[in-house]
Image (spheres, rainbow, N blue to C red):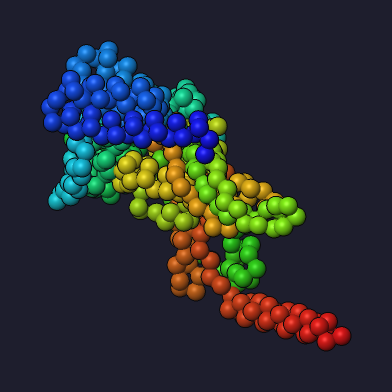
Amino acid sequence: MNTLDRDAERRKRAAEDLFRHGRDAVKAGERQRGRQLLQQAVDYDRGHADAWLWLSATTDDPAEQQRYLEWAIAADPGHAGARRGLGLLTGRIRAEDVVPEGQDLAAREPQAPELAAVRRAFTCPQCGGRLRFEPEIVDLRCENCGYVEVVAEEPAQAAQAVLDYTLPTRQGQRWAEAERRYTCRQCGAASVLPPGRTSDVCPFCGTAALLAAPEAEAELLPPQAVIPMRLEGEAVQAAVRAWLGRGFLAPDDLAHLARGSGLMPVYVPFWSFNAALTSRWRAEVQEEVNGQTKTVTRTGEETQFFTHWLQLGTRALPAKLLRELEPFDFEQAVVYKPEYLAGWPAGAYDISLAQASLDGRAAMIETLTARLWKRALPGRMVTNLQITGSDFTGQTYQLALLPVWVGNYHYHRRAFRVVVNGQTGRVAGDKPVDTVKLWLLAALVLALGVILGIAGWILLTR
């Protein structure tokens, strides 16, 4: 280690010691002494984000507090505490919405269905008939008289929200938990919907309605984006029939004998995340040194940008199958409007933003780790690759409603789940396996292994 490196290391150690003493002084109520120690800490190390954060606690002047918090974020753009403090200071986060650190929100577990009001009934202003969102024209149309109500589309690219401003709030921690009971405005019939359902069609008269339960929804985040449904039932059925006819291990008569797919449309809630992830790594690498192959330790860092990383927002559907429906084209996403749900059921999320963001971060780190084997030191023999640290920056999110058709089909009295991407027509699901084909494939693999073994033995004995 050269002189410059030793001096830099010494200054960092001194800054850390000063920071600890300064933080303890502030906690003990000695703000002036704490301020002096923390100021010395950042003089030694301008990149000590925690010292800048605690300096903001040594003053009551909002301008000074903001300046210290901005320095903390400049030193560490992903510093959640500094971003939260700046959000509170600037009004981006309401103090009454913040959940105290270390406190978990308990499930509300309502014993009876919550009373929901009809926010809007989609009825035709000309004849009183039922208005329905039509994928073909991307507008509302009356099923009775043909009246068209235009829905102005607004691209949803700018509808991203800063993750760190929402995570510490009740809205960031809550999820939908209760059934809903509502009375149809058209026919007066009462219906009970499953937890989280936000739009539906009255089963008695067919009137489409958007529902609201004010008390429960006050602590839920509203949708920010929606990808409008593009496929109607006939196109979806055709896609499923084509899918049933594919696959080597599927029974030959599957497409012919499968019955009753019972496909139903639904707008499924997804959390969409954008983030930049920088991971620091350490690995053992084989390199040529003076004509000899030696194993040396190498370190480095890799950054990857994730755009529209999707995390399922509901436990009601299988995450594995819905993952197989990707990708969704977010270039076609528009700012959420209730009109897109007219005649199409939609659900609210029962997986909180906080939980989805944790799961999403873990999945992003896993994805980058898998890619590091090829990207960190291409063309070299790498062993014992380890991630020594990961930092997220620029994290934003959207709550997006994505179009999906869900159903089951039956084959020889067994039920199998199938889902369809309502935008692209991509199909995923479970299929029965033809046992005869499976045994034939196993026999073929075994025979191939025997042939290769015999060929290898012959070559070795020559």
**Where residue 200 appears, x then y in whole percent?**
34, 42
**Where residue 296 appears, x then y in whole percent?**
60, 53
The residue under the point 48% across, 56% down is 321
For this orientation, the residue located farthest to the front is: 3
Q: Is residue 39 left or right of residue 334?
A: left
* Residue 146 showing in the rendered view: no
The image quadrant that residue 174 belongs to is top left
The image quadrant that residue 381 belongs to is bottom right
The residue under the point 54% across, 41% down is 301
Image quadrant where one finds the C terminus: bottom right
The foreground one among 155 and 148 is 155
**Where residue 252 appears, x then y in whole percent?**
63, 71
For this orientation, the residue located farthest to the right is: 462
The foreground one among 446 and 176 is 446
The total number of labels drawn is 0
The foreground one among 339 and 54 is 54
Q: Is residue 410 left or right of residue 221?
A: right
Q: Is residue 137 left or right of residue 352?
A: right
For this orientation, the residue located farthest to the left is: 29
As drawn, 315 above or below 9: below
**Where residue 455 appears, x then y in whole percent?**
80, 82
* Residue 158 showing in the rendered view: yes
The residue under the point 28% across, 30% down is 18
As drawn, 286 above or below 4: below
The foreground one among 358 and 51 is 51
Q: Is residue 30 left or right of residue 81?
A: left
The residue under the point 39% across, 48% down is 359
